Image (cartoon, rainbow, N blue to C red):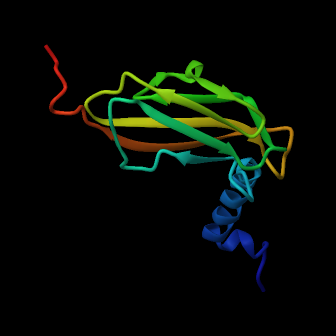
């Protein structure tokens, strides 16, 4: 005759069920469905000259995005003040790029689909190259 519940005899299964139950609330935070933002320009790896870098970001799910939380970072420095932001996106031109590789990061918060009272962050980051013309007088 056997005694005790079946799950108690399988501790591995019991641990797996407990782990899944613990991770379930985190699944509510994930933005399910369409992304919140799309980096329209520039393209990753683009080579930028002395005229600066035009950045265009589109908010793809306007009902969920909180545009007031939008930020842009250039090589880790906040350059959001160079942008004009509206309900459906943002546009701006960046100057003072470093010679060589530059990292552009766009961030925005939006409401989760499953838990609309919770804001989740979405980030897009790309790398562009800046090369000054060789004939530019640096003297």
Left or right relative to 56: residue 24: right
In the figure, residue 132 lies in which quadrant? top left
Left or right relative to 94: residue 87: right
Percent position of residue 78, x then y: 51, 21
Seen from the viewer's position, the closer of residues 57 and 28 is 57
Q: How many marks?
A: 0
Q: Residue furthest bottom?
A: 1
What's the residue at 75%, 40% (across, down)? Answer: 88
In the figure, residue 47 lies in which quadrant? top left
Seen from the viewer's position, the closer of residues 62 and 47 is 47
Give the position of the N terminus as an image quadrant.
Answer: bottom right
What's the residue at 15%, 30% (across, down)? Answer: 135
What's the residue at 48%, 43% (across, down)? Answer: 125
Q: Residue furthest top?
A: 139
Percent position of residue 3, x then y: 78, 76
Q: As displayed, is residue 73 above or below residue 89?
A: above
What's the residue at 86%, 38% (across, down)? Answer: 117
Percent position of residue 116, x then y: 86, 43
In the figure, residue 110 lies in which quadrant? top right
Seen from the viewer's position, the closer of residues 40 and 74 is 40
């Amino acid at each position: 005759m056997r005694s005790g519940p079946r799950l108690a005899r399988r501790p591995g299964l019991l641990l797996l069920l407990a782990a899944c139950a613990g991770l379930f609330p985190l699944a509510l935070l994930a933005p399910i469905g369409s992304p919140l933002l799309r980096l329209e320009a520039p393209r990753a790896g683009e080579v930028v000259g002395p005229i600066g870098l035009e950045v265009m970001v589109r908010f793809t799910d306007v009902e969920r995005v909180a545009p007031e939380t939008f930020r842009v970072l250039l090589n880790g420095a906040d350059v959001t003040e160079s942008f004009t932001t509206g309900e459906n996106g943002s546009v701006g031109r960046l100057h003072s790029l470093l010679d060589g590789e530059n990292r552009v990061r766009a961030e925005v918060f939006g409401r989760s689909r499953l838990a609309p009272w919770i804001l989740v962050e979405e980030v897009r980051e790309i790398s562009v190259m800046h090369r000054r013309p060789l004939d530019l007088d640096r003297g």
